[in-house]
Image: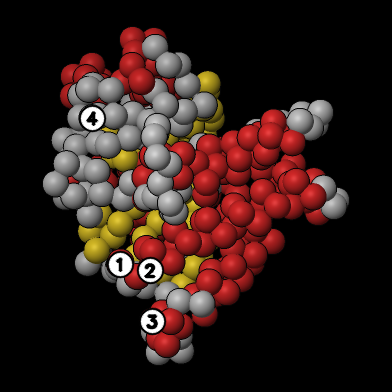
Amino acid sequence: MYIGIDVGGTNTKFGLITAEGLVVKKAMIPTNHEKEPFIEDLLQIISNYQQEYPDIQGVGISAPGIIKEDGYLLTAGAIKPLYGTHLQAIIQERVHLPVKVENDANAAAIAERWIGNAQGMSNYLCLVLGTGIGGGIVANGQVYRGFNGMAGEFGWMLLDRLPLTGDLETVSLNQRGAVVGGLCHQYQLALEAAGSKLQPVADAEEIIRRADAGEILASEVLANFYRDLAIGLLNLIACFDPEAILIGGGISANEAFMQRLKATLAELTLRHQSLAYLQGIIENNILPTKLGNDAGMIGAVYQLRQASL
C-alpha cells in the first residue's frame, strides 16, 4: 500500500492506494497556508495511515508549482510560504519512508497513462483546469519537465494584444481560460463593469446555469471563455502535435462543457489556414481525464513506484 496526497490551493486530498493504482480509502482537509502547520498536517496524515496500515511502502505527493525532480519546490502555486521548500527531503526525513513530490499536472498526466484515458499513448498533453491551468507534457512515455522543472506552465501563455503597462498576465490563459482565475474572474469583472447588482460567484457551474437561463452577461463571458481556452489548445496542437490533449479538473466531467469546447476548437481550426488543411490528415483528440480528482495522488504514487524499481 502507498499513501497518496494531492495538495491544492484550497483543499488537500489524500488516500490509501494499492500498487495497481486503486484508491481504497480517501479523505480531504483544508490546505493550511502556513508552512509549519502545513507540514504538520501532512505528517499527521501519514502517521494516521501508518498506525492503521504498518506495511505502507511510501508516500507520493502532488503539489502545485514548479517542482524540481528531487522534490524541491521553486514555487507552490497559491501556497506562498512553501516557495523554496525542499518538501520531499523534509517529509522523507520525518517519516523514514520513500517520498516522491511531483507537480500536480505532471502527476495527473502520468496517472492517465497508467490506468486512465491515455493508456497506450506515448505523446500527449494534460491540462488541469482549476484556479489556474496546470499542464503536463508526456513525451516518449516520460514526463517532460524542462531544464528548471517549469515545462507545462500552459497557463502563462499570452493570448492577444499586450497591455501597454502593468502585468502581462492579465491576458494570459490562466486569467482567461482557467475556471476560477479565468471564467469566474472574468465574470466578476464583467459584473463590476456593468454595475450589476448580481452577486459574483466562484462556481463555474452557476455561471453556466445563468447563461443557460438567458443572462446576457453570463452568456458573453462564457463564450469568451470557450474561445480563449480553445485558442490555447490550438497553440498547443501547433507546437506539440500531441496524440491527444486530456482535460482535467472538475469541469471536465461536464459533458456539455467538453462538447462546446471541442466545437469551439473545431470552428477556430477551420479558420486557421494551415491547420485547416491538415484536418482529416492528422488526428489530435480532445478527451476528458478518466481519474478525476484522484489523478494527482495516483500519479504521484506511480512516480514513486517507478523510482523504486
Give the residue at mark 3.
Answer: 274
Q: Position of residue 34 (x, y in %)?
A: 39, 12
Give SS at disc 3: helix
- In the image, residue 202 above or below residue 21: above
Taking the image as shown, residue 31 lies to the left or right of residue 103, namely right
Q: Which mark is residue 84?
A: none
The local secondary structure at tag 1 comes to: helix
Instruction: Classify residue 144 by image quadrant.
Output: bottom left
Q: Please name the amino acid that badge 3 sits on.
A: Ser
Looking at the image, which residue is at 36% across and 20% down?
80
Q: Percent position (x, y) of residue 36? A: 33, 10
Q: Which corner quadrant holds the N terminus?
A: top left
Looking at the image, which is closer to me, 67 or 47? 67
Assess whether mark 1 and mark 3 are in contact (beta carbons under 8 angstroms): no
Lower position in the chain sequence, tag 1 or tag 4: 4
Mark 4 and mark 2 lie on one chain; the one further toward the N terminus is: 4
Does residue 195 appear left or right of residue 235 in this picture?
right
Between label 4 and label 2, give the one nearer the viewer.
Answer: 2
Name the residue furthest front.
Answer: 164
The crowd level at tag 1 (other Cα within 10 Å; few <14, some 14-19, many 20+) is few
Residue of label 2: 237
> Residue tagged by mark 1?
240
Q: Earlier in the sequence, mark 3 or mark 1?
A: 1
Q: CA distance from mark 3 to mark 2?
A: 12 Å
Residue furthest toward the right? 213
- Find residue 59 and report its horizontal and vertical position in percent: 30, 33
Q: Position of residue 231 (x, y in %)?
A: 48, 61
Camera-nearest label, 3 or 4: 3
Residue sitting at 30 percent across and 66 percent down?
Answer: 239
Front position among marks 3 and 1: 3
- Assess whether mark 1 and mark 2 are in contact (beta carbons under 8 angstroms): yes
Question: Between disc 3 and disc 2, whose residue precedes?
Answer: 2
